[in-house]
Image (spheres, grey):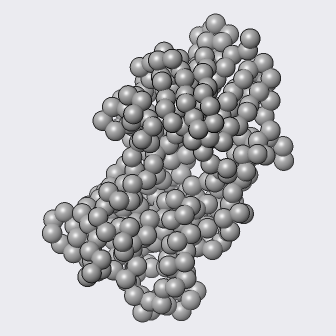
Amino acid sequence: MSTQVLVLGAGFGGLEVAAGLSERFGADIEVTLIDRSEHFMFGFSKLDVMFGRLTEAEASHPYSQLDKPGVKHVRAAIVSIDPVAKRVETDSGSFEADYLVVALGADLDPSATPGLLECGHEYYSVAGALAARQALNDFDGGRVVIGVTSTPFKCPPAPSETAFLVHDLLVSRGLRERSEIALVMPLRTPVPPVPAASEALIAAFAERGIAWHPQKVIERLEPASRELVMDDGTTMPFDLFLGVPRHVVPQVVAESGMAVEGWIPVDPLTLQTSYPDVFAIGDVTSVGTPKAGIFAEGQGVVVVDAIAARINRSAGTLGYDGNGVCYVAFGPHRAARLNITFAAGARPHGSYDAASETIAQEKKDYGISRLRRWFGGE
């Protein structure tokens, strides 16, 4: 009987594990990839949808097109996880495996910030991005505030990119001169591990007239007065609020007993959990890297190596190095690159490559190459 692997979640990390195991073993392994969604969408594509550069359909990639030997996609909602037995209950039946990989990401909890659902818009979900797009289409000038409600959150450069995109949209619609844009974050700088990137972003804020408010913690939104209330008692008015909501571990993971202090702890080099032959990767973990797909992908590569080594009764050759690349758009045709390392036991550090058309094309090519690798075919 071939080895059975259960992969929970078909995002960057889960897709990389499935593709990597298929590449190594082909039809000699049985990988069951479980996800409640019908489509995959890159996180950065949500901004394309929100600002009308892509339709939801254009940004979506159906899992039904997945064509990898040994890999089966199951569309189902996960009801419970038993990490000891490596058994998963779903609304489509039960599954057991020799190896279990939890790659369920982080869920969003906009209700954790009072008033956000009543008078603001979260834009980190597809539904939220679509609603924010309508709000932007209806906007006729005034004060736009982009706010991060808590940390950690997915893709730390994304709020800065959102501010740039709002600026560009208002300019194109002739509304910029009678509008204000502000960015509110609890962080000291936009991208703390890469000072050069933060300096470039802050300079770009100033150039575009975007007000930058660091180290501000949003306590709540007041629907009646349309104000943000900070934890220090200060307030900020808004006409349109675009918020990054609180991120939480999926409830099914919390109920499994795997999470400690909010997230799943793992060995930072092997991504092994405290349960034998159970791994966790990406946003669902407390491994210490940013919650961004590129880091989940890199962790998936390490897990593939570890599982392959155990199947072949050999020693694994890889340890997770914490390296990742993030892109941030400075306009429709220019993007910058942040090269960041979050190695275990070391201070996070990185480098910055200034925005250019070449890097914007690199970002586009990266997305195309990932789809080819993960889904198969052309």
Residue 129 visible? The answer is: yes
User: Residue at image x 49%, y 29%?
Assistant: 81
Does residue 255 appear to the left or right of 378 in the view shown? left
Corner quadrant of residue 348: top left
Q: Is residue 226 above or below residue 297?
A: below
Q: Is residue 224 above or below residue 360?
A: below
Q: Is residue 346 above or below residue 369?
A: above
Corner quadrant of residue 46: bottom right
Task: Report the front residue among 267 and 239.
Answer: 239
Q: Can you give x and y, in whole percent of width and height, for residue 5 in the image?
A: 64, 23
Corner quadrant of residue 237: bottom left
How many marks overall?
0
User: Residue at image x 43%, y 70%?
Assistant: 121
Q: Can you give x and y, in whole percent of width and height, for residue 249 in the image?
A: 41, 42
Residue at the limit of the structure toward the top, as seen here: 313
User: Residue at image x 61%, y 60%?
Assistant: 45
Q: Can you give x and y, in whole percent of width and height, for residue 347 in the image?
A: 35, 38
Does residue 333 appear to the left or right of 293 in the view shown? right
User: Residue at image x 50%, y 79%?
Assistant: 135
Residue 339 visible? The answer is: no
